[in-house]
Every structure is written in C-alpha cells, then in structure tokens.
Image: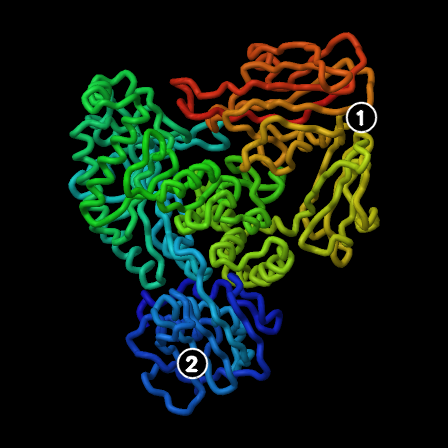
Amino acid sequence: MTNKFTFFLVLLINVAFSQNPLSLIPQPQSLQIQDGNFILSNETIIQADETLFEAQYLQQAIKERTGIGLRILPVAGKVSKICISRTVASNVAMNGYQLTISKEKVTIAADQNEGFFYGIQTLLQILPIESKEKLKLPCLRIEDAPKFKWRGMHLDCARHFFTVSFVKKYIDYLAAYKFSTFHWHLTDDQGWRIEIKKYPKLTQIGAWRNGSMIGHYREHIFDDKHYGGFYTQDEIKEVVAYAAQRHITIVPEIEMPGHALAALASYPEFSCTGGPFEVAKQWGILDDVFCPKAETINFLENILTEVMDLFPSEYIHIGGDECPKTRWKKCPNCQETIKQKGLKDEHELQSYFIQTIEKFVNNHGRKIIGWDEILEGGLAPNAAVMSWRGTKGGIDAAKQHHFVVMTPGSHCYFDHYQGDPKNEPLAIGGYTPVEKVYAFNPVPPDLATDETTYIIGAQANVWTEYMYTPENVEYMIFPRILALSEVLWGTSNPAQYVNFQNRMIQHFAVFDRKGITYSKAVFEVITKVSATPNNDGVVLEFKSANDAHKIKYTTDGVAPTVNSNSYTNSIVINKSQTLKAAYFENDKQQSTLTEQTFYFNKATGKKITLVNQPHESYNTGGAFTLVDGILGNSSKFGRDWLGFSGKDLNAVIDLGKSDLISTITVSVLANEASWIYYPSGIEVLYSLDGQNYTRIKQVSLEDIQIQKGEIEVKFTAREARFIKVIAANIGKIPDGSPGAGNDAWLFVDEIGVN
C-alpha cells in the first residue's frame, strides 16, 4: 500500500467497545442496539469494488488498528464480510448512510461515496482498539445523515506557517469527525503562503517576515527571526486531492481589500501610497490596503485565476473584513473612483470593489464568500456571508436571501481560552469552553422558517497569532472540535451535555495513544458564582468532569491537601477571602490548583441591571459579573470581563436598603490592538428611590488613563440605595487607530461600593 493510503489519524476517535459501545461522536440520528455480536477476523472479507478508495481506506484502518488484514473482493459469497453496498433506497438521506451489524455481516449502505465514508468513520469508532485474531462488534442498526452542508474548520497559516504534513493531519482530524469543509486562510499582512506563478515576488518577498511578535500584542515585544514559508502549486494540488478523497472541500481565502501588506510588500504599486512596505511583524489591523484601481483589480483577477485553477470549490473566500479606510480617504485614485461611480463614501467603495471581484469569480463559474463586513455598503448579488461579529450579519444576509455560514466569536473562535485563563496558555482573549461550543445553535431563532434555509452551516475559526506549533493548534482545537462536530451533524442536545461529555472523555485515551496534544480543561476544578437568594453574598460552586465530591478545598488561601474540606455543597461567600481547590484521586492531587479570590464590598452579590446588554462573545456571567466579588485579570481578558461592542455601560446596583457610601470603584480595560478602548468618560450617580439620581462625579478620559483603568471615586459619605455607573463607549474607532471605522469595544469588570 502506498503512502497516500497511510491514514495518519484515521483511527483518531476509535473508542474501545469494552469501555463504552455508544461513545460515538457525532452521535447518529438513529441507533438501535440489537442482540448478538459480529466476529471480525482474518477470514472476514471487505465486499466492494477493489478500486473504491473508501474500501481501501477501511482496509488500511482496520489493519493499523487491530493487525487484522482483510481482503477486498467484489463478490464474497456467504462468508463473514463487511459489505459496502450502493443503494438508492428512499430512506437514505442525502450524504447519509445505513450501518447494519448483524451476526453474519456488516453492511454500510449509501447512494454516494460520501455516505460510505461517514459510515466507515462510525464503524471505526465501534471497533475495539486491540490486537486480537478475533474481535466482537455489537449488533446494531444506524440510520444517519448530516443536518448541515457546511461543517467547517478553519486554519490560519498566514500568521504562523504549518507544513503540508501537518495540514494533511489537520484534514484527517476533520475527516474523523465528519466535517465537510476546510477553510484554508492563506494570505494576510504577516505572510503570503500560496505560489502564484504570474507574480513570483508574492512568495519570494511576501512569504517571509523579519521578526514576529512574542508574548501578547499589548506588550509589543518582537524577535528578529526570519520567518515564513509557502505552499507550491504542486503541494496545493496534493493537499486538495488528499482532502477530496476524504470528502472534504477546501475553500481557500485570499484576503482583499484589507490584510494585504504581505502582497503590497511584494508589489507596492497596488497600494494607495506606493510604499515602500515590509511584511508585517505585528498582529492586528494595518492601514495599508489594496487600492481599488483598475490595475489592482487586474492584479487580483490574475491571482484568483490561478487560485481557481488549483481549488475546485464552489466558493472562493475573499476576506473583506477589517479594511481601514484611512488611505482611501486621502487617495486621489480612490476619491476619483467614488466620484465617477456615484458612490456615497468609502464603505460603498469597498462594496464596489467586492462586487467587481464577484463578477469576475461568477464569470468563472464560482461564487464568493466573505466575512460579514462585505454587507457594508451593499452586499454583492450572489455572495455568501460568513458571520463572525456575532450572528447579526448572518441574520441580515439570510433575510436578504443570501447563503450564510455562522461562525460567531462567542462560540466558534477556537483561539479563545477554553479553561480558566489563569491556567491556560496565552491566547488572544475570550472564554469558550467545550460546554459553550456544544450549546451553539447555528440557526438564529429570529429567522422565519423560509429564511432558515439560507443557513448552510457553521465553522470554527483557528487564528494562529498565539499558536506557534502544531501542538499549539492541536491543544486549541481538541476537544472542542468534538462538540462542534455534533452540533453541525445536528444531534447535539445542550440539555444532555453530561451525556456528550462522558462520550467525549472516552476519546481522550485514543488521543494519548496517538500523541495528540489536547486540553484537559474539562477536568479542571472550575468555579461558578451566583447571587444568594436574598442578595447578601455570593454562592460558589465547584464543577469538574471528575467526581465533584473528590474536590478538596480551603478557605484560608493555603493549598488543599487530601485532608482538606471535601466539597459537598455550594459555599456561601460573605467576606473577602481566597479559596483554593483541586481534585484528588487515590490520595493524590490530580488537577491543577484552582484559586479564586473574592473582594467583598457593599455591592457584592446585590441586584444589578443593565440598559445595554454585553456582546455575546464576552458575556459569560451576565450582569452579575460586575458584582460577583471577582476582579478580572487584565492580562487575560476572558470570562471575568463584560465586553460591549459600540455600546455604553449603563448599570444600576440596588444595595437593597439605604446605606452610607463614600467610595465607588470601577475597572475598565484598554487593549487597542484588540479594539478595546477606555471609555471617553465615566459618570457615577446615586439615588434613594431609584428614580431621582444625583451625580457624584464625572471621570474624564485623562483621569481614566492616569489611574490605568482602576477607577476610584472618593467623596463625602452620604446615604444611598441605588448606584448608577455610566461608562461611555468611544463609538467608532478613529482613523489611525487599530480597527479604525469599526465599533470600539468597552470592557468593564467589578463595580465596588464602600
């Protein structure tokens, strides 16, 4: 068997039958366990066309897994066999399959090879992981098919470059969990990764940078290492063919008109200023973008011609996101185009650019898909939208009868933390644990029934600014990819998350066998806080995928031991203290230490209401986050912060009764690289009746900057019951700043009252 049939991780998710015969992910649409077993042995035959890739795939997988070598024969007679059977049965759904295991044979029935492949993946999960001459498989019947057409995973190879061998491995991960689409991000400011023969400087110059950011963006620390790489067209063809065999479509992304600095470093004549430029060392959004003049359009059309020759996908991703208009506003060419075409502004200029590119792609029998910014200024007629800034863009596009792939940052950004940020490798921010991914519903409830048909699926995005190695990527996608696979297959049930979690954990042993790096955050002792019934404190719960009753904890800040308090019920916090907890098994600590410090004040645990709700991506604990007694980590802004996109914070705390107050504290965050800006001002008011408020103080932006976001407002003591805090979002980010023209983020944490 040649190397092309060496399936690096074809058995990635196989789970020992002796442990749990039903630990299938994604869970099938219909499964019936029956009496008896099928015996797999060297005498078993794979009955199929010998040239069928799926049959060869199955043969190799069984050999690698069990040591049992099966022959492939077109006719097998009355012998023990695995029959791959083509059917046109009306009860086999599109891309679906039927898997039947009886005492006499195993049958995988489908009307397309794709269905065979999915049936094989399910069968491989049922096979035991052991080398024996004879193995038992449980008799059962499965009828199964995917709900969504676009079941996607993305990989950014521009920020950090990954070899062909790892990209193939990544595709194997997707295949094992029945994904259908690989979104390959190939160009950005920090690197151009695809060979374009007409423009060799794109890879001679654009594929290499003279340093990279290390640590977090806010630190602005760089190394001086020459870094880069690219894929030749022959390598691209090899990867595309590899994915196609596994029924995965690769959708390439060629960024335009923004995120273009690597291309402009190579060909500066297609910019507004003429350069010179260098490939970006820093992450974030940069002002120099493609100038939408005729010469640039011709340049990009020539590139897309070669791209479409390499990728047979229906869709070509053209980016369209995060394009600053700073250069366009001052560019004579751009302003002349706006005038000649009767455009209103630079947003309509971007729409004109996208529509021009779309016409070219459509004329070649393809369609474009872009990030939801392509809605701005008017959506191109046939474009599909990838909704990442929440779900609103996807909803708007679906209402306009455009196809949509949902990929909101709230649930689908796998560059976010998946465990407590204090215990996790450095990430961009956010908090998206497995349970949150599993709760994702790609179809928004506000769409009418006929509009929901335009939601063709969803995907997770893996941006790699903080992922330097394949191991980093593996850690960030596993095990969240399992949760997403079940969501997109259409069989997830958030109400039965524990059932999914138990099945998921069964897969970890296989990850260990295969040397896959993965997160064990589900085994962490994590904290969940809520208000007491009478709002006089905080209720703390410990949660873990392990037995919570084996959690040991302390309340005096000392690390727990096997003799510390056993967790049995939730704990009421009514004073400042530090709790530490860990999971113990066989008298040994088996988890990382979890530490939670509470800073108790008069607002802790009290009722709080918000006029504007936080963005779904940064709203883990709701309004209570602001009065839970927990201070957010400014270096890892994950679950302990509320994020408002373009909106003000307007919060009212009800102390429950009149009390003497003299100090108000508020924590706000700035990280301009991530579009997070200090508020333009903070207003603090108080009231006795909740109707008539008196201002205590107006804090200016200058004061906020001086206090570095840790705002303390002191005043003469007075009686108050209600405290109102208004932090004004700066609104649209100004020109010359990261994210110019977009809504600014306002991040707020604890509001204290003393």
Q: Residues within 10 Å of mark 2 (few under 14, many from 20)?
A: many
Instruction: Kindly indicate whether the residue at mark 1 contacts the one at mark 2 (C-beta within 8 angstroms).
Output: no
The quarter of the picture where residue 18 lies is: bottom right
- Which residue is tagged 2? 82
Q: Which mark is residue 656?
A: 1
Q: Residue 699's x, y, as percent?
A: 62, 11
Q: Which mark is residue 685?
A: none
Residue type indicated by callout 1: Gly
Q: Is residue 230 left or right of residue 405?
A: left
Q: Residue 627's x, y, as percent?
A: 71, 29
In the rendered view, tell whether residue 696 sits above or below residue 340. Answer: above
| Identity of the residue drawn at 35% across and 76% down | 86
| Identity of the residue drawn at 28% across and 59% down | 241
Q: Is residue 532 left or right of residue 265?
A: right
Q: Nearer the viewer, residue 308 or 211?
A: 308
In the rendered view, tell whether residue 9 sits above or below residue 285. Answer: below
The quarter of the picture where residue 386 lies is: top left
In the rendered view, tell whether residue 332 sits above or below residue 113. Answer: above
| Identity of the residue drawn at 48% across and 38% down | 390
Mark 2: which secondary structure?
strand
Sequence-earlier tag: 2 or 1: 2
Q: Residues within 10 Å of mark 1 (few under 14, many from 20)?
A: some
Residue type indicated by callout 2: Ile
Q: Quadrant of the C terminus?
A: top right
Q: Quadrant of the N terminus?
A: bottom left
In the rendered view, tell whether residue 393 sits above or below residue 50. Answer: above
Q: Nearer the viewer, residue 493 or 699?
A: 493
Q: Is residue 220 visible?
A: no
Task: State the CA–CA distance, disc 2 to disc 1.
Answer: 69 Å
Q: Residue 128's x, y, as percent?
A: 54, 73
